[in-house]
Amino acid sequence: MAAGLPTEGSNTATPRAGNLARRDVPTCRLDERLADVRERAQAAGWNVAVVVNDERVVLGLLRERKLAGDPDTLVEAAMLPGPKTFRTYASAKEVADFLTEHDMANCPITTSDGRLVGLILREDAVRAAAAAGERPAADT
């Protein structure tokens, strides 16, 4: 499960972050300009981008407010470094509770070696936890 591989047996009944992660989230590198990343993210329908290295290890996150910054700023100067991540095996309830408690809209999902799997949205985690009969914390 830590490597993001499929599971079998009773574990398949629990919705996991790796299954809910949206894999189409835009990524960028440290040396890119915000203008280029913002344009790419908006074209893909996103207001966030995950900063990764050549091995797709998560280095940072650019949320909407940061993406809207000075177009000539480099990603490295604008990003939130070392963002909170969850592993693929985290339950939807665990992710939903954390994102709700910290009023976060999303969070990167990574493998055990820190490689990006995708981005999980709070509403997806809350919905999946509720559908599985796991009562997530109240979404405020």
Image (cartoon, helix red, strand yellow):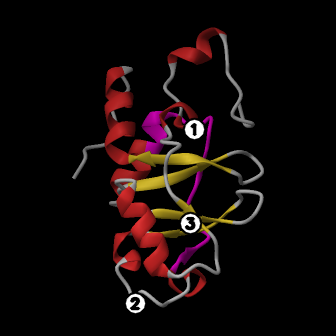
Q: How many marks?
A: 3
Question: What amino acid type should be assigned to the residue bearing mark 2?
Answer: Asp
Quarter of the image where one finds residue 69: bottom left
Q: Earlier in the sequence, mark 2 or mark 3?
A: 2
The correct choice, above or below, for 94 with respect to 47 in the image is: above
Q: Earlier in the sequence, mark 3 or mark 1?
A: 3
Q: Determine if the magenta segment contains residue 89.
A: yes
- The residue drawn where x is 58% and y is 55% is 85
Which residue in the protein does label 2 denote?
A: 70
Disc 2 residue crowd, few under 14, some 14–19, many 20+, Cα 10 Å: few
Question: What amino acid type should be assigned to the residue bearing mark 3?
Answer: Pro
Which residue in the protein does label 1 denote?
A: 90
**What is the secondary structure assignment of the residue under circle 3?**
loop
The N terminus lies in which quarter of the figure? Answer: top right
Magenta-colored span: 79-95
**What is the secondary structure assignment of the residue under circle 1?**
loop
The correct choice, above or below, for 4 with respect to 73 in the image is: above
Query: In the shown orientation, is residue 6 left or right of residue 140?
Result: right
Q: Determine if the magenta segment contains residue 52.
A: no
Where does the image place residue 9, in percent across and percent down from the top left? 65, 9
Q: Is residue 47 visible?
A: no
Where does the image place residue 110, in percent across and percent down from the top left? 64, 48
Which residue in the protein does label 3 denote?
A: 83
Q: CA distance from mark 2 to mark 3?
A: 21 Å
- The residue drawn where x is 41% and y is 71% is 38
- The residue drawn where x is 50% and y is 89% is 73
Question: What amino acid type should be assigned to the residue bearing mark 1?
Answer: Ala
The correct choice, above or below, for 23 with respect to 62 in the image is: above
In the picture as drawn, the residue positioned furthest to the left comes out as: 140
